[in-house]
Image (spheres, helix red, strand yellow):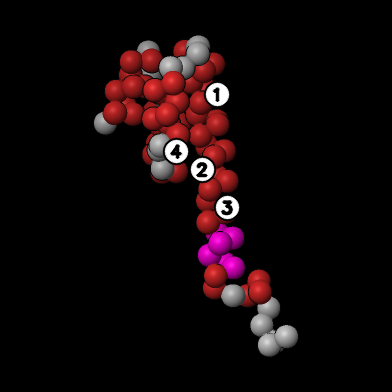
Amino acid sequence: MLGVNLKETRIYQEAKLEGRQEGRQEGEQALVLRQLTKRFGALPDSVQAQIQDCSLEQLELLSEALLDFQSLDEVQAWAAA
């Protein structure tokens, strides 16, 4: 119509990037929750909520740190910090 391609607009590009980041964060949350559940059994709702509140960067750090955790208490202490 005006010679503007919607996919080339800044707003479209930002929305696309935001959608990718949200999808990546949700995937990382799901992975961390699965790993913790496999290692420690059913997780309390409070732990699940703490993990869902983590940023993508925090989730990436947690996914590495959880390899060293020996108990669910350590998970909770990490999340509280």
The residue at the point 68 percent across, 88 percent down is 2
The span from disc 1 to disc 4 (Cα, nearest Å) is 14 Å
The span from disc 3 to disc 1 (Cα, nearest Å) is 21 Å
- Residue 64 in view in this figure: no
Q: Earlier in the sequence, mark 1 or mark 2?
A: 2
The residue tagged 1 is: 34
Q: Magenta part of the protein: which range?
A: 12-17
The residue tagged 4 is: 60
Is 15 colored magenta in this rendering? yes
Q: Earlier in the sequence, mark 3 or mark 1?
A: 3
The span from disc 1 to disc 2 (Cα, nearest Å) is 14 Å
Which quadrant: the C terminus?
Answer: top left
The residue at the point 44 percent across, 38 percent down is 60
Q: Earlier in the sequence, mark 4 or mark 3?
A: 3
Residue 75, above or below 26: above
Q: Where is residue 32 drawn, in percent x and y? A: 50, 29
The residue tagged 2 is: 25
Which quadrant: the N terminus?
Answer: bottom right
The residue tagged 3 is: 20
Q: Nearer the viewer, mark 1 or mark 4?
A: 1
Amino acid at pointer 4: Glu
Q: Nearer the viewer, residue 4 or 40?
A: 4
Q: Where is residue 39 drawn, in percent x and y? A: 49, 15
The residue at the point 53 percent across, 56 percent down is 18
Tell me whether circle 3 and circle 1 mark residues in contact (CB < 8 Å). no
The span from disc 4 to disc 3 (Cα, nearest Å) is 16 Å
Mark 4 burial class by Cα count in 10 Å: few <14, some 14-19, many 20+: some
